[in-house]
Image (spheres, rainbow, N blue to C red):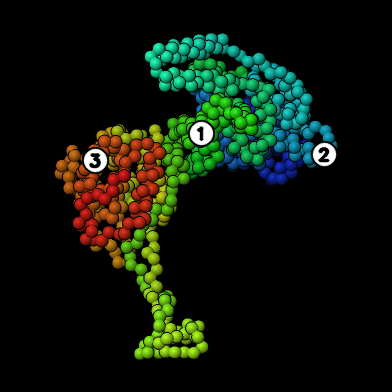
Amino acid sequence: MRRGAPAVLSPEQRTAWLAAQRLWGVELHDPELAPNAKAPSFAWFAFPPQVTFDLPEASRLGVGDFLESIFAHEIGHHALSPSTRITGLKIAHQLARALAATDAQRIPKPEDQVHQLSNLWSDLLINVRVAELQRRRDATGAAPEMVRMWQVLAWRGGSDRMWWVVLRAYEMLWTLPAGTLCPADPPAEEIDHVEAERRETARRGAARQKELDIAAAVAAGNTRLVDELEQQDSLEVQIEFDALARTNPELDSALLAETVRAFGDDPVSGALRFGMLMAPYLVRPGLPTPTTRTVGIVRAGLCAGESGATAATAGDLVAVLGDARLQEAPEHPAVVKARAFAERAHSAGAVLKAAASAGAQGATGQGYGLANTLRLYHDSDANAVIAAWYQTRARSYVRPLLQRSRTAAVSGSEIPGALETWELGDDLADIDWAASMARGTTIVPGVTTRRREYLPDIPPVAPISVDLDLYIDSSGSMTSPARESPAVLAGSILILSVLRGGGRVRVTSFSAAGQVAGGERFTRDRLEALRDLTTYFGSGTVFPLDLYGARYRGVTAATATVGIEVRRHVVVLSDEGLLSMFGAGQPQFADVAGQVRRTLDSATLILQDSRHSVAEPAAAAGYDVEYIQYMTDAPAACARLARRLATSRPATAAARRARTRGGFHG
């Protein structure tokens, strides 16, 4: 939308603008005016805080006299919802999760729907709040101006059942009689008879097949299979759950009104419930096609939403994905309410159990994974989205990663020890007279006399931060970072844990010969380290032994600068292709891994290698091994590595030179 001209408000408009600001208790610079802008509505907003109005368009819709409410609504986007750009992104994310949890495959153009639903949800919260603020201020018993404006906008015909639900919810929230803003009865549901018949045919066929399977199992005497088939109710559960997910405008409008009341001050949490209510109204039978109809709906009174929105930055993505509210299980409010009734009646049905199970999956991230997140933020840098997603998944497992110090603690003082008997011949100055008098008023040398033993005060060995040299295999046999990689999750946990402990990391991504990326130096830059971690080549697997050897050539255990403790730790994330690290395919470097190992304090391979094909050469060269296969394996492997670093004593130079075999296989 084009930018308007600086506002030159008439006296009437100025009065309304000031009144709208007082209503919210804020002060904004004057709005911009864009008459006849041909925008989707007569008002829109932008960040940094800016509102724009096409007042002639408002007059054409018949609401030009309700200036205070028009102005107050747009101010509400900055005062209440979304209020900030980050909150706006969170609301959109919640709504995208709701669409995915409902049936995103049958919702046409879900990205566009997310934008429209986001604005619709904010508009609901704002309009209800403005009406309440006007009611409190005026205290006349008359309908607030916002309500009167919506009585003018109201229902304008059509078959939009979702819009009917919204208007009916307004009637409930404003205690208006049914039929004030929309017809008393919702529009009839558009039924796809072909789709309904297909589903019924599938249901009958599945039921008949189940009967045949049971009969065959009975004939074969397989009672266990009979029991399993009789208990098999997945199809029935799905049918009932589909029935729950169907639109029910009368019920949904009441649930929507409850949602607005409950989450009027928390737009992010409420957006998920709002999305679950609205999403079924967007579902179309069958898979959507490029020609699926999505236009022709008239919803007068909605503002045009945010103007000039830019793509989310790396910092924005971390802030958004890190919000715990975005991990809440997406559930339809009707399911939540029905489960509460069922629990009170001590009878939870199969449908509710299925819904709870589906919700639990969403809570663990399975319902809205990395692929969905990349689609939602398609305008942002893909690498930034991937890094933010792994950072969020790793966050709950991050603890400061520390190690024992090699430097001996300095004894600077003494502490009192045990009392012992002072004997004749001991130094007279050693007598502890207070302790001796406590034994009795008569002093008997060698009997009642006591002396205090003093011990050197040696403080405990303090933990220190870690420098971690991390190598990650980005060959084609490794799961791409864009497809939820256990190795990348493990690397993210380690990087964030090292940085949390005050340490530094150096990340190197490798694939085929010559395909190496990453920094040469150790860094505390989180974004740089995660960017290197998620670099993906997708070619063959050749560990860069030439680079590995060059980095540690000439390094010995005795090269630590005086007063500066140098500890060296290497972690390699790979799979069975890591045989190349021990000379496979590059025999000229066959001894490099073992030679480097003798200069290190610890070296660990975290492998996706179900056959343990790297175990023997790794042990021979002195490398510890951890095995992971799934995303859920990564946190435990990282925790074991952290415990070994925290509890193990620093290796001496002799121990490093003598080390020939790995000490741990997870």
Query: In the drawing, what numbered circle is on residue 211?
Result: none
Kindly report the distance in space between the C-alpha atoms of the residues bearing marks 2 and 3. 78 Å
Instruction: Compare marks 2 and 1 and give the one earlier in the sequence.
Output: 2
Task: Say which amino acid is labelled 3.
Answer: Val
Q: Are marks 2 and 3 in contact (CB under 8 Å)?
A: no
Instruction: Compare marks 3 and 1 and give the one earlier in the sequence.
Output: 1
Crowding near the residue tagged with mark 3, few <14, some 14–19, many ≥20 C-alpha atoms within 10 Å: many
Residue under pointer 3: 614
Residue at image x 59%, y 38%? 268
Task: Say which amino acid is labelled 1.
Answer: Ala
Kindly report the distance in space between the C-alpha atoms of the residues bearing marks 2 and 1. 46 Å
Instruction: Compare marks 2 and 3 and give the one earlier in the sequence.
Output: 2
Name the foreground residue: 307 vs 327: 327
Quick one: quadrant of the C terminus? top left
Nearer to us: label 3 or label 1: 1
Name the foreground residue: 313 vs 230: 230
Q: Residue 326 in the image: state x and y as whole percent.
A: 53, 38
Residue under pointer 2: 139
Residue at image x 41%, y 56%? 502
Residue under pointer 1: 360
Q: Residue 576 in the image: state x and y as whole percent.
A: 26, 37
Q: Are marks 2 and 1 in contact (CB under 8 Å)?
A: no
- Tell me: residue 199, above or below residue 306: above
Q: Regarding mark 1 in the picture, which secondary structure is present there?
A: helix
Residue at image x 38%, y 56%? 402
Q: Residue 253 in the image: state x and y as whole percent.
A: 67, 26
- Tell me: residue 578, above or below residue 175: below
Name the foreground residue: 553 vs 378: 553
* Residue 50 visible: no
Q: Regarding mark 3 in the picture, which secondary structure is present there?
A: loop
**Left or right: where 662 falls relative to 395:** left
Q: Regarding mark 2 in the picture, which secondary structure is present there?
A: loop
